[in-house]
Image (cartoon, grey):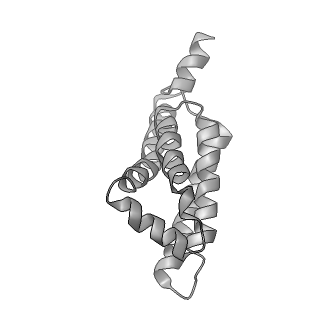
C-alpha cells in the first residue's frame, strides 16, 4: 500500500473515532444524568447508558488504533444508525434533521472501514505483517 493510502486510512480512523471517544467520555461524571434523562425522554431506558458509554469509548479506541477495525467500525455504524433513528428522526426540526444526516454520513464512513479494513498503520496491519 502506498504512503497516501496508509496516511488516509489512519487519518480517517482518527477523525471517525474522535467523535465516539469524546462523546463517551463526556457522558461520564456530570454528563451522565443529563444523558440518562435525555434517553428516557426519548423512550429509551436510561439503564442502557453504561453500554452506550462502553461502546463509544472501547469501539472508538479499537477503531483509532486499528484493532479489529472492521468489527469496531461495524458496531459503531450500527450504533450511529440506531442513534439517528431513535434520537434524531424529527425532520420538522432542522437541527435534528442535520444530526440525522450527520449520523448517516458517519455510518457511511465507518462502512468504508468495514469494507477495506485498517491499512498497514494499525494493530491489524502489524498483525498481518507478522503472519
Residue reaching furthest to the top: 130
Image position of 66 with respect to 105: above or below? above
The residue at the point 51 percent across, 77 percent down is 96
Pick the quarter of the image with the C terminus.
top right
Question: Residue 4 at x, y = what percent?
Answer: 47, 35
Question: Residue 69 at x, y = what percent?
Answer: 58, 35
The residue at the point 56 percent across, 71 percent down is 87
Residue reaching furthest to the left: 30
Image position of 131 with respect to 8: above or below? above
Image position of 94 with respect to 104: above or below? below
Question: Residue 35 at x, y = what percent?
Answer: 44, 65
- Total marks shown come to 0
The residue at the point 47 percent across, 32 percent down is 65
Q: Nearer the viewer, residue 128 or 38?
A: 38
Answer yes or no: is residue 46 visible: yes
Q: Nearer the viewer, residue 60 or 35?
A: 35
Amino acid at each position: 500500500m502506498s504512503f497516501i493510502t496508509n496516511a488516509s486510512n489512519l487519518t480517517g480512523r482518527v477523525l471517525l473515532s474522535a467523535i465516539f471517544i469524546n462523546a463517551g467520555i463526556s457522558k461520564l461524571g456530570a454528563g451522565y444524568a443529563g444523558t440518562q434523562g435525555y434517553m428516557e425522554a426519548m423512550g429509551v431506558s436510561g439503564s442502557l447508558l453504561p453500554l452506550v458509554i462502553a461502546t463509544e469509548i472501547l469501539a472508538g479506541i479499537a477503531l483509532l488504533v486499528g484493532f479489529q477495525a472492521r468489527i469496531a467500525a461495524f458496531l459503531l455504524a450500527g450504533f450511529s444508525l440506531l442513534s439517528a433513528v431513535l434520537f434524531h428522526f424529527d425532520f420538522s426540526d432542522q437541527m435534528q434533521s442535520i444530526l440525522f444526516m450527520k449520523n448517516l454520513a458517519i455510518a457511511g464512513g465507518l462502512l468504508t472501514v468495514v469494507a477495506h479494513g485498517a491499512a498497514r498503520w494499525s494493530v491489524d496491519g502489524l498483525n498481518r505483517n507478522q503472519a
